[in-house]
Image: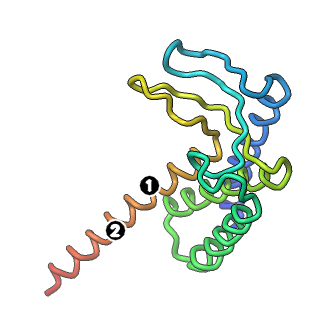
Amino acid sequence: MLQKSLIITLICLILDQIIKVVVVGTMSINSSIPIIDNFFSITYVENDGAAWSIFSGNRIFLIIISVIALIFIYLYVFNDKKLKIFELVNYSVLIGGIFGNLLDRIKFGKVIDYLDFKIFGYNFPVFNLADMCIVISIILLLIYSFKDRKGSKNAEDSNQ
């Protein structure tokens, strides 16, 4: 099970890092390439904080939080050998995303972002593949845990 998780994690991490190398190597900071007019652009920015630049300038703190999150996931998730495939994939994607941004913080002191969306006139903060891995996996795991609790509660109620 750990081997499957490692493969999924590495795929997320390698894709994230390849895209960032291409963006940094081919674009100037704060430059933008429109892909879909008034909706989606590739925009090279650097973020020294977390989402929406919170904790900006706190590189060491963000590195420590990332390492703690990775240790927590390993100790409390992967020690449970009864993970369903859905959970395994989601936690692996989460780990890949955390590692992707962690590597940026260690290498550059900031995270490389490039996905730039304008949705209904709102220019959403620029983000990257690692951010997508983190956010999507957390959302899916939350939905799964609420459904699982509801299913367990319904099973308990029917057994009484």
Residue at numbered disc 2: 148
Q: On the picture, is 73 further left or further right than 141?
A: right
Which residue is drawn at the image coordinates 63% and 69% (left, top)? 69
Decide which of tag 2 and tag 1 comes sooner along the chain.
1
Residue at numbered disc 1: 140
Query: Is residue 19 or residue 48 the one in the foreground?
Result: 48
Q: On the picture, is 159 further left or further right than 95?
A: left
Query: Is residue 133 or residue 30 the one in the foreground?
Result: 30
The percent position of residue 27, horizontal first and vertical second, equals 79, 23
Mark 2 near mark 1, Cβ–Cβ under 8 Å? no
Which residue is drawn at the image coordinates 67% and 32% (left, top)? 114
SS assignment at label 1: helix
Separation of marks 2 and 1 at Cα, in angstroms? 12 Å
The percent position of residue 102, horizontal first and vertical second, equals 74, 56
SS assignment at label 2: helix
Residue with the most extreme bottom position: 160
Which quadrant would the N terminus be assigned to in this image?
Answer: bottom right
Which quadrant would the C terminus be assigned to in this image?
Answer: bottom left
The percent position of residue 98, horizontal first and vertical second, equals 67, 57
Which one is in front in this view, the residue at disc 2 or the one at disc 1? 1
Residue with the most extreme top position: 37
Q: Quadrant of residue 63?
A: bottom right
Q: Amino acid at mark 2?
A: Asp
The dot on residue 11 is: none
The percent position of residue 117, horizontal first and vertical second, equals 52, 28
Which residue is drawn at the image coordinates 51% and 63% (left, top)? 87
Q: Is residue 127 above or below residue 96?
A: above
Q: Amino acid at mark 1?
A: Leu
